Amino acid sequence: MKKNRLSLAFLSLLIAASPLRAQDTLQNETVEQKDKRMEWFSQAKLGIFIHWGIYSVRGVSESWSFFNNYLPYDEYMEQEKGFTASKYDPKAWVDLIKESGAKYTVITTKHHDGVALWDTIVDLLRSDNKNVIINSRIQGYGDYATPEQGVPVVRPEDKYWELCMTMNDSWGYQHTDSNYKSPYILLRTFVDCLSMGGNLLLDIGPKEDGSIPEEQIAVLKEFGRWTKKHKEAIYETRAGIPTEHFQGYTTLNKAGDILYLYLPYKPNGPVEVKGLMNKVNRIWVVGNGAMLNYKVYNKNYWNSVPGNLYIDVPQQVQDEQITVLAVLLDGPIKLYRGVGQVQDNN
């Protein structure tokens, strides 16, 4: 590990030049070509963010602790002496990340403090690899948006996006931060992202010796259980239907003829889907295979307004975190988006 010794002026020139060359490389890229380049990202759904650096020695905020005058800069940089990486086991990291169901990893090899985990240079990425994907934090020339912490309330305008989120309140390891979100909260955040066509980049913060805190391991293992069970309804899905149609989260398969329903609650009665114009062929519990009973109510022969679909979800088929149902339709989904049959006379 060593500090970046490039002069500020030279580094600024390199950073400024990189997006310009990247822009030149992609200036003739068609929408179809970008979709092909981004295909793996849109199908990946779950990634793991890794914040690991000298800030884990004292458990302070990465870079911002000295920028915001919480800690003198010299004291901050003194942490470099205690950053041992003595238990760093990259294979164990990879095995755990793969077990979680994540398909990619982002690691902060160098934060704003300029301390690099490995010797680095500024690569002119797209000049060497036209298929590389860069996030939106490279001076606005990125391929996808990266909101962090706050889950979008409405679907972001960007076609491709990922939500960056911590497990507790800190990106890097802080021994005083025990405010961990439960696996349920994080999984609910995950399916919220899926329903809007986005990814979740879930953060971990290893300790200075390279070991991963037990609380974070437990979360990743529970993600692994849930994603392995429900992989059919995760990878290669797309954004679901408008929220008015179902009290929960939804996605669709590529063909649009399977509607996935995510239940972040324990239903005390049938769950309802409104405005579904299609005929339902069958409904089953994802990861369980159990076929479910369902019935359509309020469909009248004298108007075009579809009835309401009600699905029975017995307690014995429910997942301990979030249950997922698959609704097979007779073709690509069609939704009624009107205000109902308004009567102006009797």
Image (cartoon, rainbow, N blue to C red):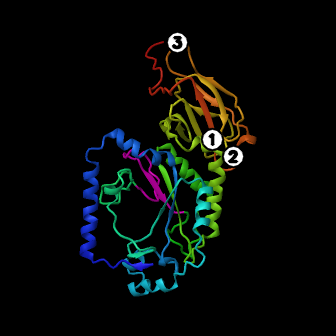
For the residues carrying marks 3 and 1, which lies nearer the camera in this image? 1
Q: Which residues are magenta?
A: 146-166
Q: Are marks 1 and 2 in contact (CB under 8 Å)?
A: yes
- Label 1 crowding class (10 Å Cα cut-off): few <14, some 14-19, many 20+? many
Mark found first going from the N terminus, 1 or 2? 2
Q: Residue furthest right?
A: 316
The residue drawn where x is 60% and y is 33% is 272
Q: Earlier in the sequence, mark 3 or mark 2?
A: 3
CA gap, disc 3 and disc 2: 40 Å
Q: Nearer the viewer, residue 120 or 212?
A: 120
Q: Amino acid at mark 3?
A: Trp
Of helix, strand and loop, which one carries label 3? loop
For the point 63% across and 54% down, the residue is: 224
Q: Is residue 126 visible?
A: yes
The percent coordinates of residue 191 (x first, y second) are 55, 47
The span from disc 1 to disc 2 (Cα, nearest Å) is: 8 Å
Task: Tell me the residue that label 2 is attached to.
Answer: 319
The answer to whether residue 152 is magenta is yes
Q: Where is residue 275 drawn, in percent x and y?
A: 52, 27
Q: CA distance from mark 3 to mark 1?
A: 34 Å
Between residues 9 and 50, which one lies in front from this camera angle? 9
Kind of residue sitting beneath label 2: Asp
Secondary structure beneath label 1 = strand
The image position of residue 32, as x and y in percent, is: 36, 38
Mark 2 falls on what kind of element?
loop
Mark before the other along the chain sequence, 3 or 1: 3
Magenta stretch, overall SS:
loop
Read off the residue under disc 1: 324
Q: Is residue 181 visible from the viewing direction of this image?
A: no
- Identified by mark 1, the residue type is Val
- Side (left or right) of 156 relative to 127: right
Residue pointed to by mark 3: 302
